[in-house]
Amino acid sequence: MISNLKTTKKYWFKIGVSLCVLFFSLKSYTQQLPNYTQYLYNMQIVNPAYVGSRADLSMSLLTRQQWVGLTGAPITNTFSINGRTDNGLGFGVTIVNDKIGLSESTNINIDASYTIITSQFGRLSFGLKGGLTDFSNNLAIGITPDSDVYASTNGSFPNVGFGAFFYNKRFYMGLSLPYILETPQFYMDKNADETSFIANPNYYFSTGALFKISENVLFKPSTMVRYVSNLPVSIDLNANFLYKEVIETGVSYRHENSVSALFALIIKEKYRIGYAYDYKFSVIGGNLSSHEIIFHLDFDLHRSSRWLLHNKCYF
């Protein structure tokens, strides 16, 4: 019994330490949004202008488990769906559930875009995002090294964002600001119902291209840059290779943060099942790797419209 008691205390102490680290990080940099390795097929989450660009109907389901082995590590699940009309309008919905430590939030957004024809194969779209985030911080059961006690909190706050996206058959470029309102979830000294403009917003810039290496192999380099004024710039560099439009493999490097390996299987040009493994560079030791799985599908209904017929699952 004494052994079980020691084990229980040790377990809760780990939760307390993890909570303190995560809570401090979140309080300092509360506007940081979840990272994704397979962002090419989850772009709607960060850029509403992406809605409608791929197919008449697109859906993505992604789950990501970060820092495996660390108590209270982030677990993120996302779902997105979007479609388009014949007149250049796109509509979609995104749902993001994020758990970290003793805190959990669920974000639901409605996305809308309008696409302009710039050339025979060029399109430029502008998008708006709006929705609501519900959160709960179950801090009352947390144990800290100093035995401090925090009250549990819950509430909700609105989301507003916008973006722009240009693409053709071989190239794309996007710029977005997905959230422009403050996220008060981890502010202990502020009213959780207070709404104000964000002090340190996340700016996203993404671009990529498609190169034909041979009859069977396509090369897809891409990058995503995330800028927040009070943090180092986050830069992702990706090199993916597509073989016979069925198998895709690649590597990704996040500057001074992690390196990743990616693999995906594409079935009948519209169903994508992908996996990514991230190895995080860490000075504190332990296993801080991450796993990410995505299921994506595109349905082209072969309607006559102003939209560019997308080049399958390339972007």
Image (tube, helix red, strand yellow):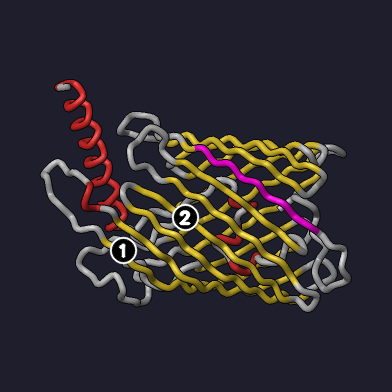
| Image-based side of 257 in relation to 115, left or right | left
Q: Where is residue 69 in the image (x, y as percent from the top left)?
A: 38, 32
Vertical side of 192 occupied by 288: above or below: above
- Identity, as a three-letter code, of the amino acid under mark 1: Asn
Is 79 colored magenta in this rendering? no
Q: Quick one: 14 or 122, which is closer to the camera?
A: 14
- Identity, as a three-letter code, of the amino acid under mark 2: Asn
- The residue depicted at 74 percent of the width and 50 percent of the height is 314
Vertical side of 111 occupied by 6: above or below: above
| Image-based side of 211 in relation to 199, left or right | right
Which contiguous range is marked in magenta?
Answer: 291-299
Q: Where is residue 266 in the image (x, y as percent from the top left)?
A: 75, 42
Q: In which quarter of the image is the N terminus?
A: top left
Question: Looking at the image, can residue 103 be seen?
Answer: yes
- The residue depicted at 77 percent of the width and 49 percent of the height is 270
The residue singled out by tag 1 in the image is 154
Q: Quick one: 135 or 29, which is closer to the camera?
A: 135
Vertical side of 139 occupied by 68: above or below: above
The residue singled out by tag 2 in the image is 97
